[in-house]
Image (spheres, rainbow, N blue to C red):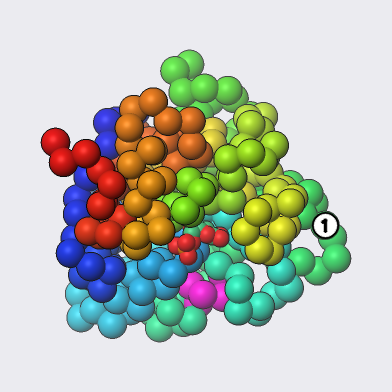
Amino acid sequence: MTEPSILINRDAEGLAHAVAARLITKLADAQSNGGVAQVVLTGGRVAAVVYKAVADSPARTAIDWGRVEFWWGDERFLPEGDPERNETQAWDALLSHVPVDKALVHPMPADSGQGAEAAAAAYAETLAAAAGPRDGAVDSESDGPAFGDGVPAFDVLMLGVGPDGHVASLFPENPARVVVDSSTVAVFDSPKPPPTRVSLTFPALANARETWFVVSGEDKADAVADALSGTSDLPAAIPQGIDRTLWLIDDAAASKLARN
Ligand SMILES: O=C1O[C@H](COP(=O)(O)O)[C@@H](O)[C@H](O)[C@H]1O
């Protein structure tokens, strides 16, 4: 696990373009051995701008989009096509603009009446089926509780952060945040609408080579400062990349960080 590095951009637009450029480079690098790049998408306002910036970038052609496998860190449990779903946002801003292999795009299940617990269990099965024999670093001795055959080794995990310090759909006071015996969890009574969600758990979020927190706006400044204080118990203080942990933030989100 890695200490966080903080990179600050002047504004949200600059941040989104910088993250887009970094993501394109990272995915191309991850494919350079001929393999499939594994990326975990997030939702939220700045994420949508990042995805659009990737889709609009001439450098997007550096990526073989048919060799990128897409996962989600969390999902708002709503019917298919609902504009509030993180999946819908990603399709609209990015996935429908690049030649992805749809078999490698794994949205969390939509609400079709099965219930969020069944949806979470189905996603855990999808993750486990895709995990190779050496994937699932969370099963190793040093990385925390095991939950079976694990999850793929993600090359990049992107996370937004809420003003309350939530990441994915793991909220500060919600019981879902303490689940460690599964890769996924159903979330009820989320303080942010919609109340029902599906999320990766912290052990699953620990299985990324690089973890990028992408955060914009003054309303996040307190959460950013707290999460990076070294003594925080906010959800945003927990995930760390195996090789690298980056906080990619704008001036407004950085405004309460100690200047040293
Ligand atoms: O509901 C969610 O919120 C967070 C943060 O979103 P933002 O609009 O405040 O940036 C996001 O990271 C998460 O994926 C999403 O489901």
Q: Residue 50 sits in which quadrant? A: bottom left
Q: Amino acid at mark 1?
A: Gly
What residue lies at 66% left-to-right and 63% top-to-bottom?
A: 193
Residue beneath label 1, please?
Answer: 115
| Quadrant holding the C terminus | top left
Above/below status of 218 relative to 199: below
Instruction: State the extent of the magenta-drawn residues as a range.
Output: 87-91
Q: Position of residue 46 (x, y in %)?
A: 38, 67
In the displayed structure, does residue 140 sit left or right of residue 65? right
Given residues 181 and 177, the one toward you in this image is: 177
Q: Does 89 appear in magenta?
A: yes
Given residues 177 and 118, the one toward you in this image is: 177
What residue lies at 62% left-to-right and 59% top-to-bottom?
A: 192
Q: Is residue 113 visible?
A: yes
How many neighbours does mark 1 have within 10 angstroms: few (below 14), some (14-19), or many (20 or more)? some
Q: Is residue 210 visible?
A: no
What residue lies at 65% left-to-right and 54% top-to-bottom?
A: 191
| Quadrant holding the N terminus | top left
